[in-house]
Amino acid sequence: MTHPANLDADRRAQILARLAARPALWRQYVEDNGGDPEFGLWLFMLDATISRHVGLTHADLPDQPYRDEYDAGTDPTEYAARVMLTELT
């Protein structure tokens, strides 16, 4: 994966449309996190990685500077690995 800002515009729009088609997910990732769809997509990508490896989401882990990492351009997959290493080992 890569930071949403680095995705092809069509691919990013396609993923956001799939997220928007599921109101509960849209609310969880976008509306509940300041209404920024790009940040919501980043969190969704982060959770996909965490969930695939340990069956949890970012909401199950201690608070992290998620927005700061997003703003810094951090790849959500790389950040998920860092969070899992520090919080789950």
Image: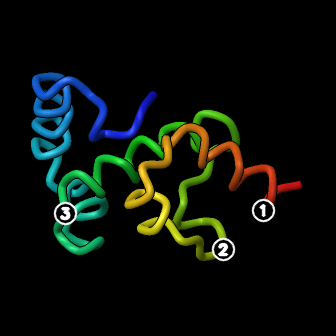
- Front residue of 45 and 24: 45
Q: Earlier in the sequence, mark 2 or mark 1?
A: 2
Q: Write down the residue under mark 2.
A: 62
As measured in the structure, the alpha-carbon distance from the residue carrying label 2 to the one carrying label 1 is 8 Å
Give how far apart the Cα atoms at labels 3 and 2 are: 22 Å
Q: Amino acid at mark 1?
A: Glu
Q: Position of residue 88 (x, y in %)?
A: 81, 56
Residue at numbered disc 1: 87
Reading the chain from its start, which is encountered first: label 3 or label 1? 3
Query: What amino acid type should be assigned to the residue bearing mark 3?
Result: Asp
Q: Are marks 2 and 1 in contact (CB under 8 Å)?
A: yes
Q: Position of residue 71 (x, y in %)?
A: 38, 61
Q: Residues within 10 Å of mark 2 (few under 14, many from 20)?
A: few
Write the residue at 67% across / 36% down: 53
Residue drawn 44% across the image and 57% down it: 72
Instruction: State the residue position of label 3.
Output: 36
**Crowding at mark 3 (Cα within 10 Å: few <14, some 14-19, many 20+):** few
Q: Which residue type carries mark 2?
A: Pro
Residue at figure coordinates x 60%, y 40% from the top left? 78
Classify 16 as above or below 36: above
Check the image and name the residue furthest to the front. 72
For mark 2, give the secondary structure: loop
Q: Is residue 26 left or right of residue 1?
A: left
Q: Residue at x 57, y 42 (%)?
A: 51
Q: CA distance from mark 3 to mark 1?
A: 26 Å
Q: Can you name the residue that lies furthest to the right here?
A: 89
* Element assignment for label 1: helix
Q: At which x and y percent is residue 64? A: 59, 71
Relative to residue 74, is residue 13 depicted above or below? above
